Image (tube, rainbow, N blue to C red):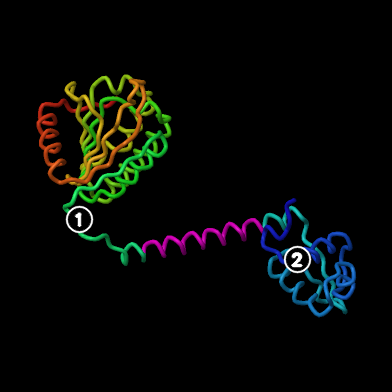
Amino acid sequence: MASLRDLGLSEYEARAYRSLLETGPTTAKELSRASDVPMGRIYDVLNSLVTYNLVRSQTASRPKKYVAVEPETALDRLLEDKKRELEEKSQQYESIVDDLAEQLESADPVEEPFWTAAVGPEDSLDLLLERLAAADHRIVMVGSSPARQVDIRAGTERIVDELEAALERGVDVSLLVRPDLFENLPESANQEYYDRLAPYDNYTARASSNITTTFELIDDIEVCIEVPHPLGLEETFGVIDLKDPDFTEDISEAFVDHWESATPIRPP
């Protein structure tokens, strides 16, 4: 059951406020009896409720009387306080992340090959997004068909979010796809790519009918390769992420050949 404590009040504060709603204007002593809040604590509790703007006091009377603010107004004020507190916490955490980003540095790239893999739609998408976020200089995306196992709209939005973030930090992004890829994507997904990415000078997109695989080349040292389903189903089975400079150099050279003969993509 929801409680005033969920919105930040202490047990005594919640008890005193509820009792004030029942008693109407009353003194601290009377409220102490009605709410079972000890007399030694009642003034601190009332002062706290006044600070929260949940209780008003009648200072001209002797002894001083207190009255509760209407519940709807009181709850709105508590909610606003909570939202403000969460916003401050969010800003605090963002500041901590910024500080840590400057402190924590990755080691220099190791020449020894390393690979990892993800199986299934969500894990595959998460791995791809992680590697796109790690790009410092260049992202090449080559696509022959969409990953049918992933909800294409949700997947598109998350990928475009990550590509736009990369463009914002100065990463060059090149997209090379089969012309018929766009026929398999919803019009809204095509528009998502064009409207959000095309305005960036460091984004380019071309189409080529010679594309037969789907992969992402990152900083010319890492490649994410889509693995088709072994049973031939119309879906992506998983993604392999491979860091191998020699292997990716061959892929990069092959990409350049396809790119030069490809056709610039026009607005959908």
Precedes in sequence: disc 2 or disc 1: 2
- Quadrant for residue 241, please give it: top left
Q: Position of residue 182 (x, y in %)?
A: 30, 23
Say which amino acid is labelled 1.
Pro
Q: Position of residue 130 (x, y in %)?
A: 34, 46
Q: Nearer the viewer, residue 226 or 33?
A: 226
Tell me the element at label 2. helix
* Disc 1: CA contacts within 10 A as few (<14), some (14-19) or many (>=20): few
Tell me the element at label 1. loop
Q: Position of residue 236 (x, y in %)?
A: 35, 28
Quarter that holds the C terminus = top left
Q: Is residue 38 magenta?
A: no
Report the residue marked by disc 1: 109
Q: Residue at x 81, y 72 (%)?
A: 58
Q: Residue at x 32, y 25 (%)?
A: 230
Say which amino acid is labelled 2.
Glu
Q: Nearer the viewer, residue 42 or 26?
A: 42
Q: Is residue 88 magenta?
A: yes
Q: Is residue 109 left or right of residue 92?
A: left
Q: CA distance from mark 2 to mark 1?
A: 55 Å
Magenta-colored span:
78-98
Specify the principal SS of the magenta part.
helix
Report the residue marked by disc 2: 11
Disc number for residue 172 = none
Q: Residue at x 39, y 27 (%)?
A: 188
Give the mark toward the camera: 2 or 1.
1
